[in-house]
Every structure is written in C-alpha cells, then in structure tokens.
C-alpha cells in the first residue's frame, strides 16, 4: 500500500506476547458486489451500486483482521472512529478490495489509513481508529446495560 511504504512508526509498537503491534502492519479484505451489498438493499440510497456502509464495513474488517493475529489471549479491538470519502460508484458483479495500514500506535489506540478499490480504480479513502480492549470485560460491561439497576425494576 503506497501510504504504508516508507512510513516511520510514531511509536515503536506495543508488544503482545511474542508479536508486535506496530506502524506498518497491513491488512486486506475483498468482496464481489452482490445485490445485498447495494445502497438499495442497505437502505442508504436507491441505486444498485456498492453501499457506503458496506465499503466502510470492509475497511473496518481489514483493520480489525490485520491487528487480530497480533493480540494477546482475551484481547480484541473495537472501532471508535471512521472518517471516509466514497469517491466512485461500483456496480453489482465487480470486485472490491480494501487495504489498511496501521500508521500510529498510541497506548491502546490504533490509527489506520484505509483505501478501497474496484477494478476501475480508487473508490474510497479514509482514516479509522480502533482501541485495544479486554474482550470479556468489554462484553460484560455492554451486556450489563440491559440489566435493570436495583430499585428501578
């Protein structure tokens, strides 16, 4: 990925067991656009072209998967911000792929540059931030939101 090459790590990285989460880590995901991936199906528009929410999900997945293999037992990452530009439409049947590059590690926060392409060229670009979490603790905290507090039943 052009934006990953030659980047200097802004922090040396975060050691996770024997592996290292560091700037320069790359990710990749792809799909072939189906009717289920369209703006019409996603409810984000009326056309049979790749929906922006689907492109965003592909970008997030590329980032998530690139970090996942470098995490310790019980760790995961969750998205906290996504800023993208969707610059070109992609029709049903065309292949789309996304490349991610981890550009910065600041404590638990990971910042990625993402780019999406179809067979005709660039279709989207942006930045995505994820934060490192303890998966079980995070899930328990989220699940606890459903439980009524004592005295408020």
Image (cartoon, rainbow, N blue to C red):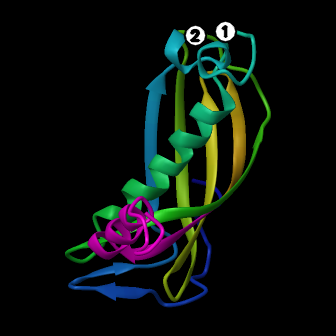
List the residue tagged with mark 1: 48
Q: Nearer the viewer, mark 1 or mark 2?
A: 1
- 137 with respect to 99 (left or right): left
Asked if residue 45 lies in the magenta stretch, the reply is no
Q: Quadrant of the C terminus?
A: bottom left
Callouts 1 and 2 close, C-beta under 8 Å = yes
Secondary element at image label 2: loop
Q: Give the mark nearest the N terminus, 1 or 2.
A: 1
Is residue 139 one of those drawn in magenta? Answer: yes
Q: Residue 149: x and y, percent?
A: 43, 72
Q: Secondary structure at mark 1?
A: loop
Instruction: Judge whether 5 appears above or below 126 on screen.
Output: below
Which sits in the foreground, 114 or 52?
A: 52
Q: Which residues are magenta?
A: 128-153
Write the residue at 48% across / 56% down: 63
Q: Position of residue 59 (x, y in %)?
A: 55, 46
Q: Determine which residue is flagged by label 2.
A: 92
Number of numbered discs on residues: 2
Q: Looking at the rendering, which quadrant does residue 139 occupy?
A: bottom left
Q: Which mark is residue 90?
A: none
Vertically, is 118 above or below 110? Answer: above
Q: Is residue 15 shown left or right of residue 110?
A: left
Disc 1 to disc 2, C-alpha distance: 7 Å
* Residue 107 in the image, given as x and y percentages of width and height: 51, 89
The residue drawn where x is 38% and y is 63% is 147
Measuring 46% from the left and 49% from the top, which residue is drawn there? 62
Q: Nearer the viewer, residue 25 or 111?
A: 111
Image point 75% across, 11% down: which residue?
46
Classed neighbour count for the residue bearing mark 2: other residues with Cα under 10 Å, few (<14), some (14–19), many (≥20): some
Q: Position of residue 127 (x, y in %)?
A: 68, 59
Characterize the local packing of mark 1: few (<14), some (14-19) or many (20 or more) Cα atoms within 10 angstroms.
some
């Amino acid at each position: 990925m052009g934006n990953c090459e030659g980047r200097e790590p802004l922090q040396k990285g975060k050691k996770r067991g024997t592996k290292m989460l560091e700037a320069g880590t790359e990710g990749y995901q792809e799909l072939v656009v189906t009717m289920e991936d369209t703006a019409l199906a996603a409810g984000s528009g009326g056309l049979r072209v790749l929906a922006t929410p689907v492109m965003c999900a592909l970008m997030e997945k590329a980032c998530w998967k690139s970090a996942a293999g470098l995490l310790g037992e019980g760790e995961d990452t969750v998205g906290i911000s996504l800023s993208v530009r969707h610059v070109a439409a992609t029709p049903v049947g065309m292949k789309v792929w996304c490349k991610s590059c981890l550009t910065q590690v600041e404590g638990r926060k990971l910042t990625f540059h993402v780019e999406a392409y179809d067979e005709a060229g660039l279709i989207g670009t942006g930045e995505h931030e994820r934060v490192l979490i303890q998966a079980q603790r995070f899930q328990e905290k989220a699940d606890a939101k459903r439980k009524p507090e004592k005295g408020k039943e």
